[in-house]
Image (tube, coloured by chain):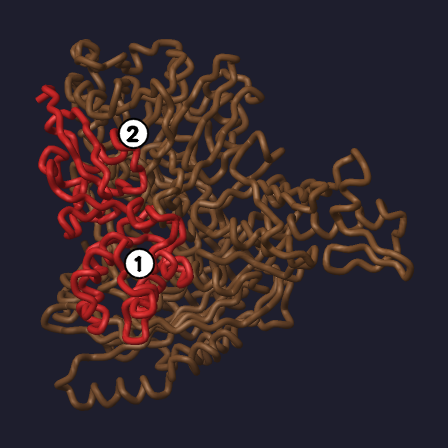
Amino acid sequence: MTGAGNYVGDLKVAGCLDAAFVRSTVAHGRLLAVDTSAAAEVDGVVGAWSAADLGDDLAFVPPFFPSAGGEDPRRCAALAVDRVRYVGEPLAVIVGTDRYVAEDGADAVRVDIDPLPALVDPGEAAASSTWLFDGVDNVATEMEFGTPIDDEVWQRAAVVVEGAYRQPRLAPTPMEPRAILAVPQPDGQLTVWVSHQAPHRLRRDLASALGLDAERIRVRVADSGGAFGTKSGTFAEYLSVVGLAVKLGRPVRWLEDRAETLSGSTHGRGQNQRVRLAADENGRMLALALEVDADVGAYPNTGFVAAETGQAAAGVYLTPNVHARIRVVVTNTTPTAPYRGAGRPEQVYAVERTVDLLARRLGMDPAELRRRNFIPPEAFPYHSPTGRVFDSGQYELALDKALELVDYTHWREEQQRRRRSGSERPLGIGLCSFTERSGLEQAPMANEWASVDVAPDGSVTARVGTCSTGQSHETVFPELVARTLGIPPGRVSLIEGDTDETAQGIGTFGSRSMQVGGAALHRAALELIEEARRRAGEPDARYADGTVITGQRSWTLAELAAASPEPLRAGGVYDTPAAFPFGTYVAVVEVDRELGNVRVLRLVAVDDCGVAVDPEIVEDQTRGGIVQGLGQALYEVMPYDDQGVPQADGLLGYLLPTIGELPPISLDTTVTPNPNTALGAKGAGEAGCIGTPPAIVNAVIDALGPQPAGTATDIGGMQLPLTPETCWLAAAGQEVAR
Amino acid sequence: MTGRIPVRLTVNETPYDVTVEPRRLLADVLREDCDLTGTKLGCEHGVCGSCTVLVDGEGVRSCLMFAVQCAGRDIRTVEGLTADGELHAFQEAISAEHGLQCGFCTAGFVMLVVGALQEDPTIAEDPERLDGLLASNLCRCTGYEGIRRAVLRVYGKDGTRQENGTAED
């Protein structure tokens, strides 16, 4: 705001070198040669390395979740060896005295690639006899959730509907691209400044991949210019930069440019989905089957994203038979990784679009159909057929509130009026009811470390293992600790994102910071109060406003801290299981049939993230997420040609929403406290990306209808994003499969 | 291409004598040579607006100008708004209205708004013109609403701009 922020690129280190990468412009091919000799001659270039030049120093990207057993046949090298597998894959790294010089060096590298057939679509890749990795086919993982549904269930059902959808690849696009600065210290320590979501994991991975001692690495997250899931990895480029800083004994930094980010970083989504839904004549759901080919890109480091889609398959609906089959498939495209929502937007889209299809098939109001099928509040904790335990929910409450807020009856009447008049733009109303997982279910990661210290001057330092990349932790965590201790927020400072200052940490992703990190700070602060009472020798004393009080006397926290050389401190690792925030979104749109433009007239979001510790900051997260969801619904896609070349290399090709695309947005909440923590908070931050796209798409389909009564399939229909061309073709009744 | 030439840049009324290659972008010279890192680079191809600065009073993308083009011209960056230690009214407003989250685009929005509204405060009175202005820049975090509220808080009909006197620096 004042220019005083310290992002990685703002840090000044004497003698710092800049790195630049040579990247593949071919999607798939034999890498015959990478000649760096001319680069090394460029004035100011300190060195240039291909994988061959690095020899035994070549590092490999550690998998997100290490697999059991020998070497991963699909592992990813820091620089490509023998084969290139996507456009944007790093082939060589150049280090020079500044970025211009390093890029001059990159231009001087000669690359020889013998092209192979490129596989762009996961369904085609799964079936192809061209394999990306020698000796193993293109299906990296197959997962099943629930049990296969008997044919009899489908045959007996009064209605069965089926849809096929595509989740396009999205570029997460934080405003700050990736950035890292590695500074070797004379004493052998190494400081790594980085824009990242999980510094402790990065430290562990850097140590294991580069053969360094983790104890001697300090990872520090500077101010971060956004992340949205795409800054949680241990990237190939980071291994090169840190490895070369150590090798050269000089500071090296890498500031990615936008063209690199768009194809060389990670993408989100990327699924081909097929959904089958059976119901009785009253609309009660009987069975749901979901089949997904998840496009994980060239290296399957993050196949776990698609697991979320399968595990949550039936969403908010009480469905006795649920089965999901997920294939994680490698293709010659940029690797996919978590992007805001990470598996949940895909699941919710598949189900919510199909629920609307079922409503049309039955001739039933889509709100009423949802209402009939929600998991009722008394059914929680709810064990789903796909093996998930939902903690709590009041789905109908959120639906009702959303319908009231949007004035559903009014818009249905307006829709009818326009249909009768025939001369006005068609109007549609779309709903999306969802639940999402926040925090993690895997026991080793369902926790966070936190500590609270009081100094003799009464100042309080809170430390936590989460890591803000723009989620206002510096505001809300001190507020939370101050409120718990009954002291002014100004007395509490927060430290996070520094592996020397925080004993351990899982990081910030999956909307876990407040739910898990906040709950950890809350419990540490409560334990600190207990410790203060013990120090006062009055375990049963009253505590209020930073003071332990008995009938006779009182002790402030500062006095208790000053009275002993032992620090006044509480902390540790605190478990918090996954939670399930939920909500209903409603979109009202009109479509210009002649131009295909979609105008969103109203967007209503009712979210329940449990107890909101700071409702304003939750609202900020919701609004930001909604606008990303709007982009996903209407504008954003990273298209590839059939040679595997991404068709957007800048922000004129990859369209982000501006303020000019902003619809009128109305927000409200319901509050169903997290039953598993005293704080009561569930995750917030990703819901906007989850609820918005299906609501808008359902509204556009509703506007362009009505379809013939009894339509039971939605195959070959409109696919995201709903560009004017897509909508124009749909309005003209043409096939729009792309 | 690699010849270096001396240039005097006047940034926030302070002269900077730098010797730069002609190909060096204004943004890079501000950040690397003048140590004014408040100006951010988000796309380096003139779309996102994070690098917006004022040159002769007009908002420009400093990633689309060469530093040598700016010799003798009046350059203003976000650092210049707080030269006297006090926040500019719009900086206060964008914070109060939650117009930033990660903060990376913020300096660009601040310079865009201050530059344009100083020239023509009536932009704030017309929602379409205001959206037209703010659509020049990209923010990926906030959903824009807080940025719009911040403009209105300062420059709107009942905005604070009048009380604060001029919004100069």
Left or right, A232 with respect to B124, comes to right
User: Disc 1 sits on a residue from what chain?
Assistant: A
List the residue tagged with mark 2: A131
* Mark 2 neighbour density, 10 Å: few (under 14) some (14–19) many (20 or more): some
Left or right, A708 with respect to B153, comes to left
The quadrant in which the C terminus of chain A is found is bottom left
Report which quarter residue B131 is drawn in: bottom left
Question: Where residue A205 sits: x, y (%)?
Answer: 49, 26
Can the viewer see residue A268 in this picture? no
Tell me if residue A22 comes above or below residue A567 in the rendering.
above
Tell me if residue A660 comes above or below residue A428 in the rendering.
above
List the residue tagged with mark 1: A164
Say which residue appears at 28% left-offset and 58% top-offset.
A631
Q: Which is nearer the N-term, disc 1 or disc 2? A: 2
Q: Which chain is red?
A: B
Looking at the picture, which amino acid does disc 2 mark? Trp
User: Disc 2 sits on a residue from what chain?
Assistant: A
Looking at the picture, which amino acid does disc 1 mark? Ala
Q: Which chain is brown?
A: A
Towards the viewer: A268 or A602: A602
Question: Where residue A279 sits: x, y (%)?
Answer: 45, 72
Check disc 1 and report its element: helix, strand or loop: strand
Instruction: Say which mark, if any, is on residue B11.
Output: none
Say which residue appears at 30% left-offset and 53% top-offset.
B139
Check disc 2 and report its element: helix, strand or loop: loop
Left or right, A655 with respect to A238, comes to left
Kindly report the distance in space between the C-alpha atoms of the residues bearing marks 1 and 2: 26 Å
Towards the viewer: A202 or A31: A202
